[in-house]
Amino acid sequence: MIKVRNLVISLAALATPVLVAYAQGANTLDDLLQETRTARDAENQLAQTRISQFNSASETDKERLLQEATAQREERATAAKGLSDAYSANEIRVNELNSQLRQKASDLGIGELFGLARQVASDVAIVLQQSLITAQVRPVAGEESRDSFLRLFAESKTVPTLTELERLWLEVQREMTESARVARFNADIIQPNGSRINAPTVRIGPFTAISDNKYLGYMPALQALNVLVRQPSGEVADSAERLLDTASGYVPTVVDSSRGVLLAMYVERPNLIERINAGDVTVAYTILVVGAAGVLAFIFQLFYLIFVRLSLGKQLRNLNAPTRDNPLGRVLLAFKGDPKRIEEDADVAELRISEAVLHEVPKLERFQALLRLTVAAGPLLGLIGTVVGMIMTFQSITETGSSDPKLMAAGIGTAMIATVLGLGIAIPLLFANALLVSLSRGMVQILDERSAGLLAESIEKRRRA
């Protein structure tokens, strides 16, 4: 019985690799379960076969099978012990060699050198990930992109190879060289609708990229250039067109030294219409209508006063021939007293002249009352918009139950738009009204002086006669 038990144990030890071999091919838990069942069935079948062979064998054959199984078990145990001893010896040898390597690296300062190289790679990887130059410098087949390589280099725990150190130097030197270069190349550009087109592109170092008179940004996730959804206008847009049209030489243009940050902030600034719509639309456009009415009145009256001033100057050079195309001429023609009785009718003549001057004054001072009203109404309308905006802000704070400073700042900023619009129309119209008052008073003064002088001259001539 002891021999039979030993034989079964030996056969079980020999059959165990069958189960392990099946289990090594499993990828999921279901596969492992199925392969375990298959291995168990195969093991049971193998055991039954061996038991049948053992039962049907003679005593001599049983003794022989037992001896063979025992010998095979001892042989494998001896091999396993040898491998275990070899593994332990190799581990001791590896530890010794690592100690020697660390000692030699410490003596030569290589550890600090490699640490510095990894630090540089980590810093440069962050720069290259956001650099426009990466969109132009494409990796060769089977090679990582330069920012990916630098990240792997920085995170690696092994000793870097000479090839890796050379590429680190190459990428740093390439970024430095391309940063001082204006390059033209074809690049895949992502449009605002998500499509890609290949178009000629001009790159100014790592700072600015332009294509088809449009400024571009860089998307690190896709490693591609994209058209900014909002484009700058005015001189900034004109500089992009000049740069694309210039084949060589020097041309003034816009360069974003922050590598796209300032340009992105600049294009996101709202224009005048967007700023107006951000406030209370009703109050804002009411202020604009009032301001437009004041501006139109000022322009009309300004041209009228300029024309009258020119005609007055022409009349002043020829007082003996008054005409009705200017106020002074009409005042002079209004004096129709009898020259023989001018001294007796001096009071009547003065009244006629005063009447003529007063008849001309309303036209000269036209729209000044409207401008004064506009100047006073603009800030008041702005104050109404500010109060309405503040009320809405406090209502939103009450409804949300949040005192977030960003929420309050946005609401207050919206409320201030009406105030800015009110002051924006009041201050220019205040100066405009002052200009009209100055011009009209000057011409009224001319009318008073010349009419009084005409009356005095006529009386003096009568006395001399």
Image (spheres, rainbow, N blue to C red):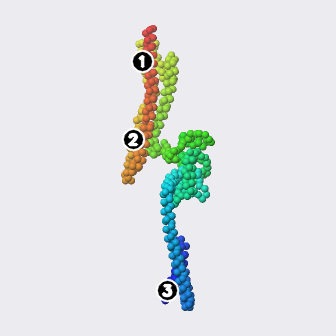
Q: Amino acid at mark 3?
A: Arg
Residue bearing the label numbered 1: 350
User: Decide: marks 1, 3 in contact (CB < 8 A)?
Assistant: no
Point out the tag, 2 or 3, that comes first from the N-terminus.
3
Q: Amino acid at mark 1?
A: Glu
Q: Secondary structure at mark 3?
A: helix
Q: Nearer the viewer, residue 464 or 221?
A: 221
Q: Position of residue 19 (x, y in %)?
A: 53, 77
- Vertically, is 313 above or below 138? above
Outermost residue, right side: 247
Residue bearing the label numbered 3: 5
Point out the tag, 1 or 3, that comes first from the N-terminus.
3
Q: Secondary structure at mark 2?
A: helix
| Disc 1/disc 3 C-alpha distance (Å) | 152 Å
Q: Position of residue 177 (x, y in %)?
A: 57, 47
Residue shown at 45%/16% (left/top)?
Answer: 454
Total numbered labels: 3
Residue bearing the label numbered 2: 383
- Vertically, is 23 above or below 465? below
Point out the tag, 1 or 2, that comes first from the N-terminus.
1
Q: Nearer the viewer, mark 2 or mark 3?
A: 3
Mark number for residue 272? none
Q: Amino acid at mark 2?
A: Leu
